[in-house]
Structure formats: structure tokens, C-alpha cells
């Protein structure tokens, strides 16, 4: 069911969208074939996580630990991924270090020739464990941070002393000579700290900083009122990022994603549905994206079934339904950008319009686009209390934080 349909009443003064360079978009014409061999897979080893971030990208209905794939099943999956030509494996969660077999899985990925990335909150890592992962062949570490200092970061993550631990682990990553990406998920309640977050990432010797503004599906949609930035905040955020990019050229790359609600073109979500990437859930469901289960009515095959991953990628209905451009109705069908953005995000289209076939309302050509600004405007003046992510459907933040 669509979680939060757009209101019928448009705002009287729609906010101007953040400008994008359309030439740049056109010149970034999607590279390579539409689909063939997926480049990368994100494996969500578990939905268990000590943090409770209110924008977690996991589905609202989390998969219980009793349903998680066994070590033997994950090892078989890793072998199969390598066999079909996948190049990268991103070990994610939940918190992937909650799995006791993580070192074994990383070792198998390395032996199979896969480039491995650990996407972690870092709070469960010890120096020994990180060293064992490096010895097993781990290629890259991505650590999320929730703010520039403990007061904000620990509140957002719902985990006391987490921020300090993350910084300690980030230093270990560099001591072990592993490349480090810092992922900073930004929203109304931490955007003021962006300059300090950038300085922090530089001091941690991160090669890359992802300034990833929250996108609103799943848990984040439930927390939209508490997370949505204002238009003025977004403009300041863009200014800070652009200045930092110029200042830090050759030192640290900064990836920057604005909230779709303030965009005028949709993002090429997942590089296009079923085109380059896919996810495997803790219980083995093969998903076109991390939020695909939010689209009701789609059936997903599992690695526990009798079909190969390659078969699922090529043939399963869930992948083929929105793959490429042939499925598109107007305004996407006749749009010059359709092979660039592939219609944007299916999950967002479903969440905001009730149909995943519609153009992503982030697109200026969508009939729902103007109302998106109304929603953002209203949400930006909402209350600050979070609904923390957990296995029981969420827990409201206690008053006083
Ligand atoms: Fe599912 Fe964008 S998050 S297509």
C-alpha cells in the first residue's frame, strides 16, 4: 500500500527547484549495455543492527535473524556471483559485522576474485576483527556517520558513544592501509554540521565523502517530518559542498545527492532498474533494489529456490517489469532523458503516486511534481522527534531526546 500519497492541494508558491545542468546530464549518457551481467551486488547479510537510524534503508518489516541465510548458503551465493561475472560485492546489513562468519565470507569473496566493500556502522568492530577482515582480502571500508560530534550523531543513531567508536575504527582502517569512504546521511537535524563533517572526513583521511541527503522511502518516509530540510538549508548545503569540492580537489572526492523533493530531474536510481546492480536480502530474496519490497504486488525469487541467480536476473518478473525503457508510459516514453534516468526511482513513484509505473514525481515532467514541493515545505516545518528503526515497527523518541 502506498504509505504516504501526495496531497491534492498544491502549494500556492511552489519552491524553485535546485538547478541542474541538463547538458551535463545528457553528456553523462548511460554507459555500457542496458543489462547483461550485473556489475555489483549489495548483500544484506542481516537486518540486525545496534543502531536505530530513523532513515534506515532496510524495509520497515525487517527479516528476523532466524530467517537469515546460513554460512554455507552465503558461500554458495558468493561463488555463484563470481561465476556469472559480478565484479563487486558490498557487504551490508543491518550491521554486517553482527554476522560471526563475516571474515569467512570476505575471504571467499576475495578468493573468488570479487572486489569487496564493507558498509558498516563500525560500532561492533574491534581492531583484531578489522585486521582479520583485511587479512581475508577486504578491499574497502565505508563507515557511516550521523553528525560531526557525539551529541547529534548518537541521538540520530540512537546509540550512545557510537560516534567516538566510529572515529576510532576509521583511524584503524587507515592504519591498515584500507581505502576509506565516509558516508554522511544528511537531513534537517544535522545539515548545520556539514562544514564540520567535511573537515572530519578530511582529518580521517577518507578518499571519498558521500554527502547523501535522505531519500524518503521506508523508514525515512515514516520520519519525513523530522528529517526534511528546508529549501534554504538545501541551498546552503549545495554551496558548502561546491566550495569544499573546489578546496579539496585532489584530496578527497565528495559525492553529493540532494533530496529528490528538491530536484527537478529524477536520479538514475540503482543505475536503472535491473540494469547494473541488485540486492540480496538476509533471507535470500533477490531484489532489484533495497526498497523494492515496498512495492506491493511484486514477487521476488530467492537464492533458496531452485533457480540460479543468473536466471533470476535475466528472467524474473520483478526485474523485467521496469527494466529498460519499453515499459514506460508518458511522459517518460517520449522523454529525451529516458535512457539517462530510466524514469527515476520506482519505489518513490509507488510511495508518492500509488503506482510504480508512473514517472518519479522528482521529475519536473511528472504531473505530481509541483505537489512534491508542497509536501517538502510542509514536512520541513514538522516536529523533530524520531521514530527509531527496530524490529517492532519503530519506537518513538522519548521527549527530551
Ligand atoms: Fe527502489 Fe529507487 S529505491 S528503485
Image (spheres, grey):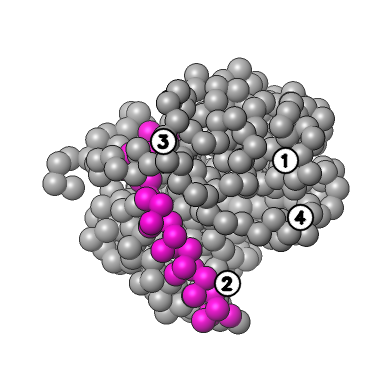
Position of 132 compared to 7: left or right? right
- In the picture, residue 37 is in which quadrant? top right
Secondary structure of residue under mark 4: helix
Residue on which the image places disc 2: 253
Q: Which tag is nearer the camera, tag 1 or tag 2?
A: 1
Crowd class of label 4 (few under 14; some 14 to 19; many from 20; radius 10 Å)? some
Q: Residue at x 30, y 37 (%)?
A: 387
Q: Which residues are magenta?
A: 221-249
Which structural element holds mark 1? Answer: loop
Mark 1 vs mark 3, foreground winner is: 3
Q: CA distance from mark 1 to mark 4?
A: 13 Å
**Disc 1, ligand 1: is the CB inside 8 Å?**
no
Q: CA distance from mark 3 to mark 2?
A: 39 Å
Callout 4 touching callout 2 (CB < 8 Å): no
Residue 179 x/y as whole percent: 57, 72
**Distance (Cα) linking label 3 and label 4:** 32 Å
Q: Earlier in the sequence, mark 3 or mark 2?
A: 3
Tell me if mark 3 has few (under 14), some (14-19) or many (20+) residues whose alpha carbon lies within 10 angstroms of its own.
few
Quick check: is 230 in the magenta stretch? yes
From what the image shows, is residue 123 above or below residue 219?
Answer: below
Residue at x-position 52% and y-position 70%: 242
Q: What residue sits right under mark 4 in the picture? A: 26
At a point 79% along the width and 35% down the height, the residue shown is: 334
Q: Position of residue 322 (x, y in %)?
A: 73, 30
Q: In the rendered view, does 398 fall on the left or right side of 242?
A: left
Q: Is residue 81 above or below residue 374?
A: below
Q: Is residue 227 visible?
A: yes
Q: Which residue is mark 3?
A: 12
Amino acid at each position: 500500500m502506498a504509505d504516504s500519497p501526495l496531497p491534492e492541494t498544491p502549494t500556492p508558491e511552489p519552491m524553485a527547484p535546485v538547478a541542474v545542468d541538463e547538458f551535463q546530464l545528457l553528456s553523462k549518457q548511460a554507459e555500457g549495455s542496458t543489462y547483461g551481467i550485473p556489475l555489483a551486488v549489495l548483500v544484506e547479510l542481516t537486518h540486525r543492527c545496534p543502531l536505530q537510524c530513523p532513515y534506515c534503508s532496510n524495509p520497515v518489516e525487517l527479516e528476523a535473524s532466524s530467517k537469515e541465510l546460513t554460512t554455507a548458503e552465503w558461500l554458495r551465493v558468493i561463488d555463484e556471483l563470481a561465476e556469472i561475472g559480478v565484479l563487486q560485492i558490498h557487504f551490508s546489513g543491518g550491521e554486517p559485522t553482527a554476522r560471526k562468519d563475516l571474515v569467512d565470507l570476505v575471504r571467499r569473496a576475495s578468493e573468488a576474485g570479487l572486489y569487496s566493500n564493507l558498509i558498516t556502522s563500525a560500532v561492533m568492530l574491534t581492531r583484531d576483527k578489522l585486521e582479520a577482515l583485511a587479512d581475508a582480502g577486504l578491499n574497502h571500508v565505508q563507515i557511516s556517520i550521523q553528525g560531526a560530534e557525539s551529541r547529534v550523531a548518537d541521538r540520530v543513531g540512537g546509540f550512545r558513544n557510537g560516534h567516538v567508536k566510529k572515529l576510532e575504527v576509521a583511524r584503524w582502517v587507515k592504519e591498515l592501509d584500507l581505502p576509506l569512504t565516509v558516508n554522511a546521511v544528511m537531513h534537517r537535524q544535522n545539515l548545520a554540521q556539514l562544514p564540520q563533517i567535511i573537515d572530519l572526513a578530511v582529518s580521517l583521511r577518507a578518499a571519498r565523502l558521500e554527502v547523501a541527503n535522505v531519500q524518503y522511502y521506508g523508514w525515512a518516509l515514516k520520519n519525513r517530518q523530522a528529517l526534511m530540510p528546508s529549501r534554504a538549508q538545501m541551498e546552503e548545503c549545495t554551496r558548502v559542498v561546491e566550495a569544499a569540492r573546489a578546496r579539496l580537489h585532489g584530496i578527497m572526492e565528495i559525492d553529493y545527492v540532494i533530496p529528490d523533493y528538491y530536484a527537478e530531474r529524477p536520479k538514475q536510481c540503482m543505475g536503472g532498474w535491473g540494469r547494473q546492480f541488485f540486492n540480496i536480502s538476509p533471507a535470500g530474496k533477490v531484489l532489484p533494489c533495497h526498497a523494492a519490497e515496498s512495492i506491493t504486488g511484486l514477487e521476488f525469487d530467492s537464492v533458496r529456490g531452485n533457480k540460479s541467480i543468473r536466471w533470476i536476473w535475466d528472467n524474473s518478473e520483478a526485474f523485467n517489469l521496469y527494466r529498460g525503457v519499453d515499459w514506460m508510459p508518458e511522459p517518460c516514453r517520449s522523454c529525451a532523458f529516458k535512457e539517462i534516468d530510466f524514469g527515476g526511482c520506482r519505489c518513490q513513484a509507488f510511495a508518492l503516486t500509488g503506482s510504480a509505473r508512473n514517472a518519479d514525481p522528482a521529475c519536473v515532467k511528472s504531473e505530481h511534481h509541483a505537489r512534491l514541493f508542497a509536501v517538502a515545505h510542509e514536512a520541513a516545518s514538522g516536529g523533530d522527534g524520531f521514530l527509531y528503526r527496530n524490529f517492532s515497527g519503530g519506537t518513538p523518541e522519548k521527549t527530551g531526546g
